[in-house]
Image (cartoon, rainbow, N blue to C red):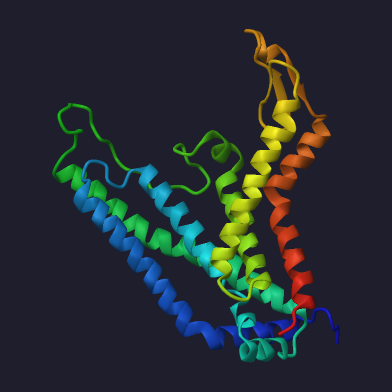
């Protein structure tokens, strides 16, 4: 039997985790659905004119995904926070890789699938309710003759309301997996208050990045030159700024974009695996 990863042993760990936590997970799913339904019902009552417009759906989906997903990720290895629970968790006859993969399965993969399903189970009927309200009560915007039009269900992959970077590269969705992976790493590093400590760590990292970008790069550029998008620089001293653009080689730009889009969660998961191997109670 492989000491690093054995599928049958890992599947038993996954099954044990579900048996121990299924009631909590089922209650959490009901709570998420109830909160979404309550929020949408409030919007429908207070803001009748196009209450379920795509922007409201877009904001609701991502605000809930980021908050609930990161909060849940910070509890994946919460058992390591207490001595008795930590000893029990570390003594489970499974490798550290199997424990990490079990956490990723429940905290990342299944959570995203279940959250999205619950969202659409709540969203689609209430969008229909909003459309019926428009047809029955107010088919035009208040004080105008402009028709409101039929409200479309928010599409995760084809969204006209999203910013350009999100529309083209799905940066908000990919950014969620990056940030959530940081909270998963925080659940391994911090024994107590991991959610708050991870938020503080992310803010400090972002502050250091901004200081580096402004003080370390921006102030050392030639007169009139400014950072365009962190990998390109242009000259704004005259009207021909678009003709004076300095950029990295194409292969380097592609590599950086790939790293930003896809690789960071795997890096955080790998660090979490190393930290989990070193964990002691």
Whether residue 129 is visible here, answered yes or no, is no
Q: Residue at x 57, y 54 (%)?
A: 176
> Where is residue 131 shown, x and y percent of the image?
25, 47
Residue 106 falls left or right of residue 7:
left
> Where is residue 35 shown, x and y percent of the image?
34, 65
Residue 21 vertical position relative to residue 175 in the rendered view, above or below? below
Residue 118 vertical position relative to residue 50 in the rendered view, above or below? below
> Where is residue 124 shown, x and y percent of the image?
35, 55
**132 and 169: which is toward the camera:** 169
> Where is residue 138 shown, x and y percent of the image?
16, 39
Q: Residue at x 40, y 53 (%)?
A: 60
Residue 206 vertical position relative to residue 189 in the rendered view, above or below? above
Whether residue 55 is visible here, answered yes or no, is yes
Residue 208 falls left or right of residue 164:
right
Toward the right, the furthest residue is 2
Q: In which quarter of the image is residue 125?
A: bottom left
Q: Which residue is drawn at 76% across and 79% down?
A: 96
Q: In which quarter of the image is residue 36?
A: bottom left
Residue 261 vertical position relative to residue 8 in the rendered view, above or below? above
Q: Which residue is drawn at 41% across and 78% down?
A: 27
Residue 72 falls left or right of residue 272:
left
Toward the top, the furthest residue is 239
Query: How many marks can you see?
Result: 0
Q: In which quarter of the image is the C terminus?
A: bottom right
Q: Quadrant of the N terminus?
A: bottom right
């Amino acid at each position: 039997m492989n000491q690093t990863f054995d599928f049958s042993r890992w599947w038993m760990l996954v099954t044990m985790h579900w048996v121990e936590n299924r009631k909590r997970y089922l209650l959490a799913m009901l709570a998420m659905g109830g909160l979404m339904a309550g929020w949408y019902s409030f919007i429908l009552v207070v803001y009748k004119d196009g209450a379920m417009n795509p922007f409201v759906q877009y904001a609701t989906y991502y605000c809930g995904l980021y908050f609930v997903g990161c909060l849940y990720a910070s509890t994946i290895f919460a058992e390591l926070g207490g001595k008795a629970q930590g000893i029990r968790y570390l003594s489970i006859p499974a490798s550290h890789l199997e424990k990490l993969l079990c956490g990723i399965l429940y905290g990342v993969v299944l959570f995203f699938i279940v959250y999205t399903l619950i969202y659409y189970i709540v969203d689609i009927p209430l969008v229909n309710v909003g459309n019926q309200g428009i047809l029955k009560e107010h088919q035009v915007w208040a004080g105008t003759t402009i028709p409101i039009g039929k409200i479309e269900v928010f599409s995760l992959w084809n969204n006209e309301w999203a910013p350009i970077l999100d529309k083209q590269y799905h940066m908000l969705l990919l950014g969620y997996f990056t940030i959530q992976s940081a909270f998963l790493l925080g659940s391994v590093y911090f024994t107590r208050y991991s959610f708050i400590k991870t938020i503080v760590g992310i803010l400090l990292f972002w502050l250091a990045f901004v200081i580096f970008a402004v003080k370390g790069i921006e102030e050392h550029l030639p007169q009139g030159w400014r950072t365009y998008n962190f990998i390109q620089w242009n000259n704004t001293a005259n009207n021909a700024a678009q003709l004076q653009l300095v950029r990295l080689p194409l292969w380097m730009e592609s590599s950086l974009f790939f790293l930003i889009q896809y690789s960071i969660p795997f890096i955080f998961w790998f660090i979490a695996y190393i930290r989990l191997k070193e964990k002691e109670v």
